[in-house]
Image (tube, rainbow, N blue to C red):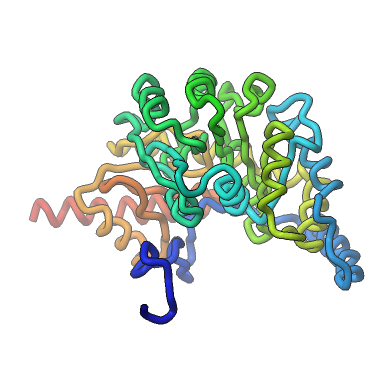
Amino acid sequence: MTFPPLREELVGLEPYGAPQLDVPVQLNVNENPYPPSTEVVADIAASVAAAAATLNRYPDRELVELRARLADYLNSSGGSGITPAQVWAANGSNEVMLQLLQAFGGPGRSALSFAPTYAMYPEYARDTMTTWVQGRRAEDFSLDLPAARELVLEHRPSVILLPSPNNPTGTALPPEAITTLCEAAGDGVVVVDEAYGEFRRTGTPSALELLPRHRNLVVTRTMSKAFALAGARLGYLAADTAICDAIRVVRLPYHLSAVTQATALAALRHADELLGRVDDLRRERDELVDWLRGRGHEVADSDANFVYFGRFADRHAVWQGLLDRGVLIREVGPDGWLRVSVGTPDEMAAFRQALVDVTTQGTSEEQA
């Protein structure tokens, strides 16, 4: 045995993570580009200061106040009648997902999703020793629903992971797709990951509306994106109370610090202000989609705060050309495609100009 005695399936693997580079325009990790206002910062600072005076004691391990305020928010953001007992929170939606796999996955069980999708999903399965089953999306990145249903019936996964909007493509799921897979899953848990749910286009419903109909449905959200709190690390879910109680069995004691809880509660007091830029980002996104299509690029419809576009014979060359011009985006998903986060008007102008320069240069070199 070599040292350290790492699990065999982890040997040689690199940790997950997007490049963190110091460049003028960072559009690669789907952050909200607008920081909290001075008023929000002051409230968070005061709340954290109050929490700091109690740091000799453990925090509320059941997150009573936070779960109540999150339920209130969800009932104003697509849900109805959600109670605090139906809500759970953790350190980012990543930990929420991991807890779900710890509770409902494991040896002899499987988790299923449809590629291209969030690259961390198979890692949650790997880390919990859950068999990973991967279906494929249609050419337009939607779900081939009959094929998806057959795959679920064939493998009978204990957990199905369905991001909506999907990362990296931005594709949202229609309610009938969620209902079909909830019914096909039987007693399996169907997780609809709405990390970007607040950015959905008008007319695109939230899966929260379906919670009363499906006891096996879980809807996850995060404060990292629309709430502009990526640095706070607060993710949460809404589900049947039996699911929340099961997660409490596997969560670590006092997993959510008093500082994190205080920060999240302060942010929820300012929800309207923090979400005030969502409409601006939607508008920038839609204008970017139109502009990219106008230049002849293939672009996936997006309900998120990012845009997936292609197709490039050498996407890495385009990515590198943009980086050379001070613009960082993301190489992710199928070859030929790139993902760009929606930023401020100035950042989007810089991206547009850099892309024109890179693609024009590429065309000129081909003609030469």
Residue 286 visible somewhere in the drawing: no
Front one among 68 and 239: 239
Is residue 262 positioned above or below 292 on the image?
A: below
Work out whether residue 208 or residue 300 is closer to the camera in this orientation and state it.
Answer: 208
Does residue 250 appear left or right of residue 132 in this picture?
right
Instruction: Report x, y in % for residue 8.
Output: 37, 66
> Does the image show residue 146?
yes
Q: Quadrant of residue 212?
A: top right
The residue located at (36%, 78%) in the rendering is: 1
* Of the pair 1 and 354, the residue shown nearer to us: 1
Residue 361 percent across, percent down from the top left: 22, 56
Residue at 71% x, 34% y is: 242
How far from the left and from the top, in percent, is residue 27? 47, 55
Q: Residue furthest left?
A: 368
Check the image and report above or below for 236 versus 25: above
Image location (x, y in percent) of residue 178: 52, 24
Left of 285 or right of it: where is 35? Answer: right
Q: Is residue 285 left or right of residue 90?
A: left
Question: Taking 343 as reference, is 213 left or right?
Answer: right
* Residue drawn at (61%, 50%) of the image: 99
Quadrant where the C terminus is found in the figure: bottom left
Residue at 38% from the left image edge and 34% from the top image edge: 300
Q: Residue extending furthest bottom?
A: 3
